[in-house]
Image (cartoon, rainbow, N blue to C red):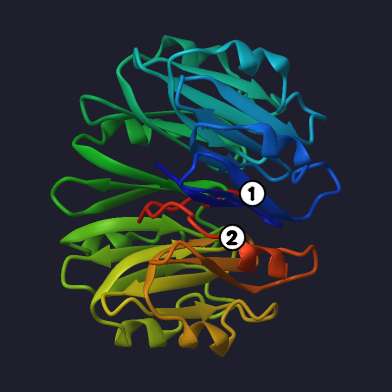
């Protein structure tokens, strides 16, 4: 389960006692103290300006911006939920019977009734305005905004998919043979055919317009937008990488010696050398312009844009944040 989730400007952390803490941008009540009343939380997810928690009894709770009904009380009626995911202003719940339900903004068909026909879903991931689900037979289905071919029928040809990742308007899937496939917006080469040459891939991650693949030998490959050095050759020097995460225009790699390395856009100090001082890191996650590292002692460290208190020192007081190598980015 995801234990730290980041949006563009706020962060939600799940503690080992099943409670959550939030910090960052709060204009839309993303950090409303309401969240302090939740217990027995097992997963957290963030949209652009709203957050969702999944409780151990299979119910969900939402708070934050409700302009598009992202926090519609309807979600409180769901039971037997096993996973939640957020787009920019819509949300998706996966139930234990393999079905999904959506709520929130529908201006790009994010709530298209087609999703009601899916069964045997095992994973759900959201881009800004589209959603992708992985079925038990290893195939994927998409719905929502199709302006950039995010829901191009090409995805129906993929089989043996084991992981999905979404950028702002493109998607990447990892197949069980260690190769990757992409579709959607290609204006920044997010779907550049170069990715088809990669083999032995074990993890994928997407930024807004770039993607990163982690290979079984501990090296990484990047493709897509390079206007902010997202494809800086420095990443080619990394070995023994065990996890990757992407912000809008920067990336973070966790190494096997429990340290982290960053590259890409540094306008907001996303790649500030301070991250080089962190040790005993067990997981990393990125917001739009900031990053969070979870340490083995259950504490967290943040760096990057602090314009909305994303790196508020309050996070330094948190302990017993639950440990996971799963990560989430939505913006």
Few, some or many residues within 10 Å of mark 2 (<14, 14–19, 20+): some
Decide: marks 2, 1 in contact (CB < 8 A)? Answer: yes
Q: CA distance from mark 2 to mark 1?
A: 8 Å
- Across and down, in percent, residue 208 comes to 57, 58
When the figure is inspected, residue 47 is found, relative to residue 300, above or below; the finding is above
Please state which of residues 164 and 72 is positioned toward the viewer in this rendering.
72
Of residue 166 and residue 326, the one placed in the foreground of this image is: 326
Q: Against 109, is 241 above or below? A: below
Which x, y percent locates residue 216? 17, 66
Residue at horizontal 53 percent and vertical 19 percent from the top: 59
Q: Is residue 36 left or right of residue 179?
A: right
Residue labelled with disc 2: 318
Q: Identify whether 257 is placed above or below 145.
A: below
Among numbered discs 2 and 1, the one appearing first in the sequence: 1
Q: Quadrant of the N terminus?
A: top left
Q: Which mark is residue 21?
A: 1
| Left-right relation of 51 to 130 | right
Residue 196 to residue 290: above or below: above
Secondary structure beneath label 1: strand
The image shows residue 325 at horizontal and vertical percentages of 35, 56
Disc 2 is placed on an element classified as loop
The disc label shown at residue 281, or none: none
Residue 146 appears anywhere in the view: no
Apparent side of residue 151 relative to residue 198 in the rendered image (left or right): right
Left or right position of 295 against 197: right
**Structural crowding at the residue carrying mark 1, measured as other residues with C-alpha within 10 Å and reported as few (<14), some (14–19) or many (≥20):** many
Residue appearing at x 59%, y 85% in the figure: 272
Q: Quadrant of residue 273?
A: bottom right
Residue 232 versus residue 81: which sits nearer the camera?
A: 81
Residue 121 seen? yes
Q: Position of residue 60 (x, y in %)?
A: 57, 24
Name the residue at 51% across, 82% down: 275
């Amino acid at each position: 389960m995801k234990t730290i989730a980041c949006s563009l400007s706020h962060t939600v952390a799940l503690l080992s006692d099943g409670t959550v803490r939030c910090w960052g941008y709060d204009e839309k009540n993303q950090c409303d103290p309401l969240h302090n009343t939740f217990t027995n939380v097992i997963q957290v997810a963030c949209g652009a300006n709203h957050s969702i928690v999944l409780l151990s009894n299979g119910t969900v709770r939402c708070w934050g911006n409700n302009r598009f009904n992202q926090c519609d009380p309807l979600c409180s009626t769901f039971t037997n939920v096993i996973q939640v995911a957020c787009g920019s202003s819509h949300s998706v719940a996966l139930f234990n019977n393999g079905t999904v339900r959506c709520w929130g903004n529908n201006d790009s068909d994010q709530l298209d009734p087609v999703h009601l026909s899916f069964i045997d879903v095992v994973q759900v991931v959201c881009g800004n305005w589209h959603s992708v689900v992985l079925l038990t037979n290893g195939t994927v289905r998409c719905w929502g905004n199709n302006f950039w071919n995010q829901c191009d029928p090409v995805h129906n040809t993929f089989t043996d998919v084991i992981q999905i990742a979404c950028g702002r308007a493109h998607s990447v899937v990892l197949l069980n043979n260690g190769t990757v496939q992409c579709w959607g917006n290609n204006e920044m080469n997010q779907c550049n055919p170069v990715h088809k040459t990669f083999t032995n891939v074990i993890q994928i991650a997407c930024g807004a317009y770039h993607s990163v693949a982690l290979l079984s030998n501990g090296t990484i490959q990047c493709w897509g937008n390079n206007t902010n050095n997202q494809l800086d050759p420095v990443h080619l020097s990394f070995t023994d990488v065990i996890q990757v995460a992407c912000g809008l225009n920067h990336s973070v790699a966790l190494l096997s010696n429990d340290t982290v390395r960053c590259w890409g856009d540094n306008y907001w100090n996303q790649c500030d050398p301070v991250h080089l001082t962190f040790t005993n890191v067990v997981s990393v996650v990125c917001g739009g312009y900031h990053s969070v590292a979870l340490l083995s002692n259950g504490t967290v460290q943040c760096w990057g844009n602090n314009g909305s208190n994303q790196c508020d020192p309050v996070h330094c007081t948190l302990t017993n944040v639950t440990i996971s190598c799963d990560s989430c980015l939505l913006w």
